[in-house]
Image (tube, rainbow, N blue to C red):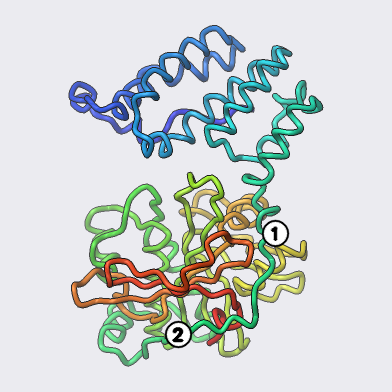
Amino acid sequence: MKKQIILLFALFISAYQLIAQTTPSQKIDEFITQKGDGFNIAYDKKDEKSYNALLSEYLVLHEKLSVDEKKERSYELSNIYYNLTCIYSLLDNKSSAINCFKKSIDAGYNNYGHVQLDTDLDNIRKEKDFVALNNKLKLTGDYLFILKRANKYNLSDSRPLPKFNYQASDNSNLMALRKTFNLDSIAGQGNDVLKILNLLHWVHSLVPHDGNHGNPEVKNAMSMVEVCKKDKRGLNCRGLALVLNECYLAMGIKSRIVTCYPKDILKIDPDCHVINSVYSESLKKWLWIDPTFNAYVMNEKGEMLSIEEVRERLISDKTLILNPDANWNNQNQQTMEDYLYNYMAKNLYMLECPANSEYNMETHREEKTISYIKLIPLDYENQKPDKVESEGKITVYKTNNPKVFWGN
């Protein structure tokens, strides 16, 4: 059960670029484009000789990369070694398989869950050295295990933080947004929870998710939606959350964008996920709302949960239910296992919100300053400094106190 090696971006290299390439990273792109399928063919045939020949070619190019480039391509190299591990295991060459498994982990392989299910590894699974390596991998790649170790906060943490503020719906820009998109009609005449969900479904279908590109330079809802329609493009998770956030504010519903971060012990995971925390006046609580996946989460009674509650329930192994129509781009249905117990378990380690939730809040302007508040668990290694300033325009305040972070 192999992991794919070929990177998606390699498929988009033009013929002209292939001719003009000169940098080491570009040469690897060319190599993957031209010979990447050879790895998969060799795996399918269990042909370790051909596979190792391709690996040798790849390593010559890889050694010419900078330290940062090697880190960026760690996924690629680690999967190449992982697939070779599978070949050797299937051939019952246990020592070579375990040696390649170690090289895969050293290169950054981190998919603990995949390893536990991969039948290719059954021939080495009980070997002492494999068990030791698998236990090492658990510390960096078992995301639910890592999250469960991050269950302690400090309710007495009283470090000074800015207060959370929510722009009023009578702001002229929000009023224009409400009118332009006819948000009253989209939200409907039901209670506030139905309005929250109707707006979620609308934004999810309005603009597709595109995680491979950045968002437009001007980051307010009307501008981003206009650019997406004009250029036939999508937004990443942050862009979608920003659009939905402004729609909620325009309707007088308190909302924040919440950046969900992994612990990233190996310092090779650039991924995070951005969702919305939306306040229901009728339920008197915050709700988990994710426009990328059209997702919200419930308990066994069908009651909608907050981000804080979902995190706590993941840690304590309590029942969680994902809405059945959760999906990516109206194509791929999301499952509990993939979305909550793998992807979001990874990304619920640390959480960050802007202190001021408002129109156009993340568009860069010379006079614009923005403050974020980050909730970090006590087992995180970087507890200090209390705040981090970036070029005088962005300040991130740290807290260990979830009551302050989740306060209104």
User: In the orientation shown, which residue stands out farthest toward the front?
Assistant: 385
* Marks 1 & 2, CB-CB < 8 Å contact: no
Mark 2 lies on residue? 164
- Residue at position x 41%, y 74% from top? 372
Q: Is residue 129 visible?
A: yes
User: In the orientation shown, which residue stands out farthest toward the top?
Assistant: 49
**Quadrant in which residue 240 is drawn:** bottom left
Image mark count: 2
Query: Residue 93: x and y, percent?
Result: 71, 12
Q: In which quadrant will I find the N terminus?
A: top right
- Residue at position x 70%, y 62% from top? 314
Q: Secondary structure at mark 2?
A: loop
Q: Is residue 221 visible?
A: no
Please rate how many residues cluster around mark 1, counting C-alpha atoms within 10 Å: few if below 14, some from 14 to 19, many from 20.
some
Query: Residue 387: x and y, percent?
Result: 43, 73
Please rate how many residues cluster around mark 2, counting C-alpha atoms within 10 Å: few if below 14, some from 14 to 19, many from 20.
some
Q: Is residue 92 above or below residue 74?
A: above
- Residue at position x 61%, y 40% from top? 111
Which three-letter amino acid code belongs to the residue tagged 1? Arg
**Quadrant in which residue 19 is drawn:** top left
Q: Nearer the viewer, mark 1 or mark 2?
A: 1
Query: Residue 330: x and y, percent?
Result: 49, 54
Mark 1 lies on residue? 149
**Quadrant in which residue 244 is drawn:** bottom left
Which three-letter amino acid code belongs to the residue tagged 2? Phe
Q: Secondary structure at mark 1?
A: loop
Query: Residue 102: x and y, percent?
Result: 62, 28
- Front one among 245 and 327: 245
Q: Is residue 77 above or below residue 318?
A: above
Residue at mark 1 to residue at mark 2: CA–CA distance: 28 Å
